[in-house]
Image: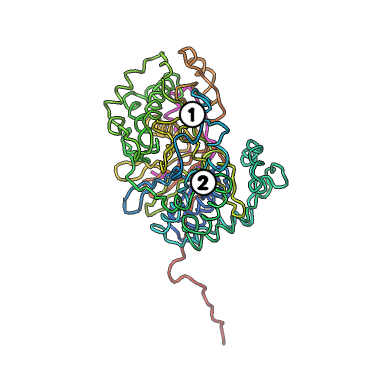
Amino acid sequence: MPAGALTSQRWRENSAVTFSPSNRPAVGYDGVVGSTHALGSAAGAEILTAGGNSIDAAVATLFALSVVEPMKMGIYGAGFMNIRLANGERFVIDNYSQAPMAATMDMFTPLSDEWPNYMRARGDLNQTGVLASGVPGALKAWCEVQAEYGGLSLAEVMQPAIRYAEHGFRATAHHCKFVTDTQDLLQRFSATSSIFMPGGRVPNAGDLVVQRDLASTLKRIAIEGSDYLYDGELGQEIVRYLQSQGGILTMGDLRNYQLRRSDPVTGVYRGFTITGPPPASAGGLHLMEFLNVLALRDVRGMGFGRSATIHLMAEAMQLVFADRNRYLSDPVFYEIPFDRLMSEFHARELLSQILPNTVLPELATPALAESDSTSHMTTADREGNIVSATQTVNHIFGSKVVVPGTGVLLDNTMANFDPHPNLANSVEPMKRVASSMAPVIAYRGDRPAFALGLPGGLRIWPSVAQAIVNIADHGMTPQEAIEAPRMFTQGQAVELEKELGTTVEDSLRSMGHEVEMVSNVAGGMNIIEFGDDGSLAASSCWRSDGGAVAVSRGMAREGVGLTVVEPVTD
C-alpha cells in the first residue's frame, strides 16, 4: 500500500486517549527528508533535486542544522548515524565525543551523590566553559560518509548551510526561547553573545540570525574537508584558544580521534527487525531490552494510553534504566553483559518483578542525566539508501563557548560522564561518553519498513520504543505514532504528557506512582515510512520546529524540445 496515511481507526477502539495529528506527511517517490528544523529538511531536499542521493542529502541536512539549530548541534559535536545502503549493507557510524588524553577521573568534583544533582560538578565545570568540551566526531563523520557514499562533492552539499550562515535565517519562537533560557551563561562569553544576542539582547521571532565567521569556516571546510579541523588551521586555532583559557585539548586529541564503524544492534519486535546503535549508546541494547519485556505481554489488548499499559511501561523502563545506569559505558573500557541483557531469559526475569497495581521501590542505581538539546534527521531515496542520524552539542548551546573568529560553538559532552570516580561511566582518557541516542531503521524481512529518531537525552530511546509500540501493537500510522502522547521515567516520578489526561494520572497515583504532568516528553521525532508501491512518506511532530520535504522529480522525455514551425510560403 502507499505510504503516508494520516490516521488509523484500529487503536482508537481500545484507547483511553484520543488525539489527532498536528502535522501531515510529505509523500514522494524520489526522496524524502525529515528533520528537527524545516530549513534543514529543505537543504536535504535541495540536494536531492540536484541529483544527489540520500547520503548527500543527509550530510547537507546535518550541515544546515548546524547553522539553524546551533543550540542543539554543530560541526564540533557528536552523535550516531544508522545507515542502510542501496545494496542492502547496514552499518552504524559512532561519531560520539571522547575525553581528551589529559582527562582524569578526578578532574571534576561531584556536587552531590543524590538526584537531581548527581551529575553536576562543583562550579559546573563539566557543563560550562573550556573543560566541558570533549573531542568532537561530527565533522569527521559527515565528511567521510559523504566522500565514501555520496554522489556529489562536499562543496555542493554544503552550499545551503553556507548560505544560511552567510545571509542568515529567521529566528523562530523556539530558537528565541533557547536563547532566553541560557542568556546569563551566553553573556559570559563575548564571542558567543555577539552572535546569538547581538546588541546584548535576545532576538525576537523573525529576526535575522547571521553567522559570518561560521560561514567563512564552512567555506574552508568545503575546500579542505575535515582535515581543516582535525589536522589543520581550524584545529590549531581552537586548541590555542582552549589552552589559553585553561583547557586541556591538544592537536594530538584531534589527530587521534577515530570514527567507529560497526554492525547495528539488531532485535525483533512483533515481526519487525529493529536496528539501532551499539554501546556506548543505549539506543540499540537497552531499547531492545525494553521491547523484549513488552513482547511478553499482550500490549495491543491492553490498549493505548490506559493506566495498566503505562504502569507496565513505567516499571519495565525503571528496570531497564537500572541496567543502563549500571552497565552502559564505552565497551573499549568496560565489559558490558550484552548477550545476557538482550536475552529472552533476562526479559522474563524483569517481567517477573512487575506486578499489577504494585509499584517497584526506587532502585539503588545512579540516576543519570543527559541534555535534551539535540537534533535528528532521517533521509531516504528511491534506490534504497537510508540515513537516520542523531547529533548533538549536548546541553543547550553546548559549553556556551564560541572560539573567537571561527564561529564554531564547542560541545559540552564531558557533562555526560559521571563525575564520580571508579564507575562504568566515569571520566577516563580517550573514553567515549555514554549516550541514549536511538537512530533506528526497522525492517520487515529485508525490506525497510520505517526509520525514525528524535532529540531528548535520556528520553530518546524510551520515546522511540513508544513509537515502535504505537505502530507494531496499536496499529497507528507513522504520523500518529510520533505525535501520540508519551510517558517517561527512570525510577523517579512518571512523566505524563498532559494529553494522557487526569483519569490516567489519578489511576497511576492510586497504584502508588508519583506522577508529573508535563507539556512534552523529549523533542520532535521524525519518521520515514516505506510504501509497498515505492512511495516514501516523511513525517515530523509538533515538539520541535521540524519539517518534512518530499521530492518527486520529473525529467523530460528523450527528444522533447521546442517544435519549430516552418513558415508557410506560397
**185 left or right of 499?**
right
Q: In the rendered view of the protein, which quadrant contains the C terminus? A: bottom right
Does residue 153 show up? yes
Query: Residue 374: within the magenta?
Result: no
Disc 2 packing (10 Å; few <14; some 14–19; many ≥20): many
**243 left or right of 489?**
right
Disc 1 packing (10 Å; few <14; some 14–19; many ≥20): many
Residue 551 horizontal/vertical position (percent): 48, 53
Q: Looking at this view, is 112 or 21 the one in front?
A: 112
State which quadrant residue 145 falls in: bottom left
Q: In the rendered view of the protein, which quadrant contains the N terminus? A: top left
Q: Which residues are magenta?
A: 1-24
Residue 569 horizontal/vertical position (percent): 56, 86
First in residue order: circle 1 vs circle 2: 1
Main secondary structure type of the part rendered in magenta = loop
- Colouring chosen for the image of the structure: rainbow
Label 2: which residue?
548
Query: Residue 12: within the magenta?
Result: yes
Label 1: which residue?
486
Residue 219 horizontal/vertical position (percent): 55, 60
State which quadrant residue 362 falls in: top left
Name the residue at the bottom extreme: 570
Q: Amino acid at mark 1?
A: Arg
SS class, disc 1:
loop
SS class, disc 2:
strand
Q: Amino acid at mark 2?
A: Ala
Q: Looking at this view, is 159 or 281 the one in front?
A: 281
Q: Looking at this view, is 135 or 507 the one in front?
A: 135
Q: Looking at this view, is 538 or 325 the one in front?
A: 325
